[in-house]
């Protein structure tokens, strides 16, 4: 058995939820010198540029989670402010992108999966994005792990979809069918000037939690059923976020998937699988 096949087999065999929650407890612990040591080892292992962080001293962070979701210095990620530009929501790398064809998204070469399954099973929600475009962005351990709005939007719906916790790295994406539609995830649907925009926050092995700025920690605890929440899109209780504002965060790495409807925006030609992304930089142009 090759090393890659062994790694995939181990993921199927491993009690992923149990391991992830145990790691989550360690990441949330205020363990003093141990926490600082773990952070220093992590910085060294993944070659993290702490000069970008608002607080560059590892000892500043009381928990590993505080370090992992560290804020950046002001101005480190300049925001493209043109009204007709959709920006990248995260630091990471594009895994796949392109048109949504017959309700299917590309996961990797030879692997497609269902948009309806990704969004939690609702035909009504799925119909909003048929014929549109999508992009999958993978956040590596070294990346900044706060998620920002790519365009102004007002929250209309949030969906929690239970699932597995496979790793979402490129090797797993190439070998585990329906990966993003089988992992635990949180879907946020926003009303925007290009119509509905879906932002799907996909969980993964040792992702301790997924949070949004309006609901706090959505998971854990993990559930067994799909849950959805509808939000008013007008009035004083409407949750409206400007382009570049934080909308959520991962505690340990994962993936964000964007989707919008047909003929709404064109992804720039220089955006391809493997392209490194930086939050706030141009990603797509809104159609006239």
Image (cartoon, rainbow, N blue to C red):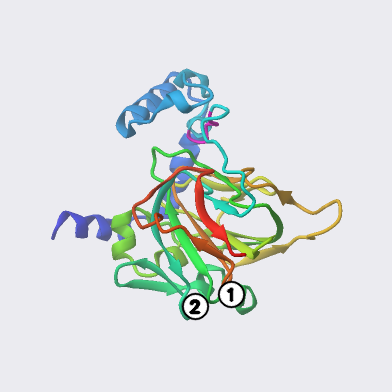
Q: Looking at the picture, how far across and down is residue 22, in whole percent?
A: 45, 43
Residue lying at the far front in this picture: please name it: 288
Viewer-proximal residue among 153 and 182: 153
The residue nearer to you, when weighing 50 against 86, is 86
Q: Residue furthest right?
A: 235
Viewer can see residue 134: yes
Decide: marks 2, 1 in contact (CB < 8 A)? yes
Per the image, label 2 sits on a secondary structure element best described as loop
Q: Between 32 and 283, which is closer to the camera in this rendering?
A: 283
Q: Residue at x 76, y 60 (%)?
A: 231
Please determine whether, in this image, residue 214 is positioned above or below residue 184.
above
Which quarter of the picture shows residue 3? bottom left
Residue appearing at x 30%, y 32% in the figure = 45
Residue 184 to residue 150: above or below: below
* Element on which disc 1 rests: helix
Give the residues in magenta. Answer: 68-72
Q: Please provide percent x and percent y for residue 42.
A: 36, 31
Q: Is residue 82 magenta?
A: no
Which residue is at a point 54% across and 48% down the rendered structure image? 89
Residue 69 drawn in magenta: yes
* Residue 14 horizontal side relative to residue 151, left or right: left
Q: From the image, tell me which residue sits under label 1.
A: 126
Indicate the position of residue 270 as horizontal and vertical percent values: 39, 54
* Image quadrant in which the C terminus is located: bottom right
Q: Quadrant of the N terminus?
A: bottom left
Quarter of the image where one finds residue 105: bottom left
**Which residue was labeled with disc 2?**
103
Per the model, the C-alpha gap separating discs 2 and 1 is 8 Å
Tell which circle, 2 or 1, labels the residue nearer the N-terminal end.
Answer: 2
Tell me the crowding category of disc 2: few under 14, some 14 to 19, or many 20 or more residues within 10 angstroms, Cα based: some
Give the crowd class for mark 1: few <14, some 14-19, many >=20 residues within 10 Å.
some
């Amino acid at each position: 058995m090759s090393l890659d096949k062994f790694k995939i087999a181990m993921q199927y065999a491993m009690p992923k939820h149990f391991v992830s929650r145990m790691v989550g407890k360690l990441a949330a612990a205020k363990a003093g010198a141990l926490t600082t040591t773990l952070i220093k080892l992590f910085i060294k292992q993944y070659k993290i540029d702490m000069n970008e962080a608002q607080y560059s001293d590892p000892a500043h962070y009381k928990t590993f989670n505080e370090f992992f979701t560290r804020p950046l210095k002001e101005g480190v990620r300049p925001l493209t402010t043109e009204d007709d530009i959709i920006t990248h929501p995260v630091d990471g790398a594009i895994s796949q992108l392109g048109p949504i064809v017959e309700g299917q998204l590309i996961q990797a070469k030879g692997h497609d999966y269902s948009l309806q399954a990704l969004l939690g099973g609702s035909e009504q929600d799925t119909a909003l994005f048929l014929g549109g475009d999508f992009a999958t962005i993978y956040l590596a351990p070294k990346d900044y792990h706060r998620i920002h709005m790519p365009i102004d939007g007002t929250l209309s719906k949030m969906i929690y979809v239970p699932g597995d916790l496979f790793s979402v790295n490129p090797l797993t994406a190439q070998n585990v069918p329906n990966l993003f539609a089988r992992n635990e995830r949180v879907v946020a649907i926003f009303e925007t000037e290009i119509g509905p925009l879906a932002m799907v926050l996909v969980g993964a092995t040792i992702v301790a939690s997924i949070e949004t700025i309006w609901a706090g920690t959505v998971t854990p605890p993990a559930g067994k059923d799909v849950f959805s929440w509808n939000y008013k899109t007008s009035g004083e209780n409407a949750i409206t976020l400007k382009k570049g504002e934080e909308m959520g965060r991962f505690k340990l790495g994962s993936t964000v998937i964007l989707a919008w409807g047909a003929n709404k925006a064109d992804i720039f030609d220089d955006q391809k699988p493997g392209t490194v992304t930086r939050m706030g930089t141009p990603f797509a142009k809104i159609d006239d």
